[in-house]
Image (cartoon, grey):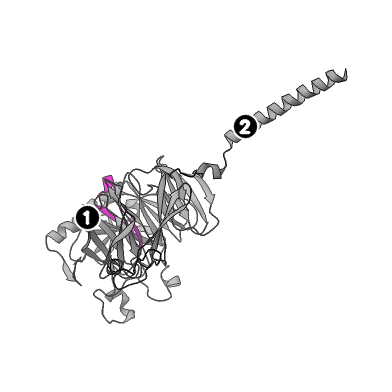
Amino acid sequence: MKVKSHGKIFRLLSTFLLIGVLGLLFACEEKESPAEKVYVPPGKFDSYYAFLSGGHSGQVQVFGLPSGRLLRQIPVFAPDMAIGWGVDEESKKIMGEYTWGDAHHPALSETNGDYDGRWLFINDNPNARIARIDLKDFTTKEIIQIPNVTGNHASPFLTPNTEYLIGATRFSVPVPNRDVPVESYKENFNGIIAFVSVDKDTGHMQNAFQILMPPFDYDLGDSGKLVSYGWAFFSTYNTEEAYNDLEVNASQKDKDFIAAVNWKAAEQAIKEGKFKEINGVKVIDPREVKGIVYLLPTPKSPHGADVSPDGQWIVGGGKLAAVACVHGFEKMQEAIKKGDFDGEVMGIPIIKYESVRVAEVPVGLGPLHTQFDDQGYAYTSLFVDSAIAKWKLGTWEVVDKIPVYYNIGHLATIHGDTVKPRGKFMLA
């Protein structure tokens, strides 16, 4: 009897153990940990490279995704003793007179609106420069100085076939620079939107032309795509044109602007000789050449200006707003054709807000920058909320929001600023 009893108990325990083991196996299959999802075994390649700016190090870091491994550090604007960058004569010649920089916005070269893997461009904010890195060997090949630009923060943003790198001034100055009273800021100071041409075969950069702009602060930009090809869009704040106590005086208005630039029309104006030369660069004055720039009212202190993959929508992220403002490219074209304006600044027409705005998406507090995936969703960083909002293009519905636990600025999805986003991962 005892033997039978033990046998029954053993069989029962065996059954329970088997069920338990199977349950554990099923649980493992169903609940893959975050670490397992991004694990890349030794000897295997990551799916993607992430090129991240190094800020005041003046360098670019290359990380693997999804592993997060640091694969390479590329010296650009500052010496690197480990590889002799800035020490040998060749690299010293490329670096020029500066031995430091503040690198902000890496931009990959594009063909037909998607990355082509040839070059990486990176800006130097304080010294108004752009560098080109060859992705055949991950080394810096060229650095160009941009005249008339002070604070090259809104840079570099590429046109869809890398015809131009576009940048704008963070801080307005007298153009040409001269000794004038700061109290005459509105009359004597200007911003600049600069176009740097890129040779399609060699990548060689040259200053092509510039557009004189009102003395706003220009933060970031994006080029039009597909239906909006030939245009570029830059966020602006301090449209009050203040020069002191900026925390108060530069945040008075409920709306600032996104500057919409018709760079194809600007090209034609240059061909027709409608420019003046300042410090060796051809400069277009919008007071004299019409149809080059328009201003789109955008709430409030917009930092992001991001174009959807199909080129239809321009998303403005107002750092002091609670909504992401979406403008429609077709609506903008219709408003321009009808002359549906609400005044002008320095000869630049201001399009009526109701005539260009498509939606105000209630993403949360402090929206900044927006990226896109391959499923028709947009992702907006929220500086004040310390979160990321996910919302649907077309319906303008917020479908998700996740905390980031710090004051997020930039974010990036895979190919998230191209005509063909890949989704899969996001860096916050």
Q: Is residue 200 left or right of residue 154?
A: left
Q: Could you tell me residue 236's position as x and y percent?
A: 35, 63
Relative depth, front residue between 126 and 370? 126
* Residue 101 falls inside the magenta stretch: no
Residue 202 is labelled as 1
Q: Is residue 326 above or below residue 123?
A: above
Name the outermost residue toward the right: 1
Q: Quadrant of the N terminus?
A: top right
> Is residue 315 in view from this perspective?
yes
Determine the image quadrant of residue 153.
bottom left
Q: Which labelled disc corresponds to residue 25?
A: 2
| Residue drawn where x is 45% and y is 71% of the image | 247
**Does residue 248 lie above or below 298 as drawn?**
below
Q: Amino acid at mark 1?
A: Thr
Neighbour class for label 1 at 10 Å: few (<14), some, many (≥20)? few
Closer to the N terminus: mark 1 or mark 2? 2
What's the amino acid at mark 2?
A: Leu
Q: Residue at x 57, y 39 (%)?
A: 32
Comparing 58 with 91, the one in front is: 91
Mark 2 Cα-neighbour bin, 10 Å: few <14, some 14–19, many ≥20:
few
Between residue 147 and residue 276, name the one nearer to us.
147
- Farthest residue, direction left: 272
- Asked if the stretch drawn in magenta spans residue 228, the answer is yes
Q: Secondary structure at mark 2?
A: helix
The residue range painted magenta reads 216-234
In the drawing, does residue 192 fall left or right of residue 83?
A: left
Q: Position of residue 85 (x, y in %)?
A: 35, 66
Locate residue 138, reporting x and y percent.
34, 55
**CA gap, disc 1 and disc 2:** 55 Å
Residue 258 appears anywhere in the view: no
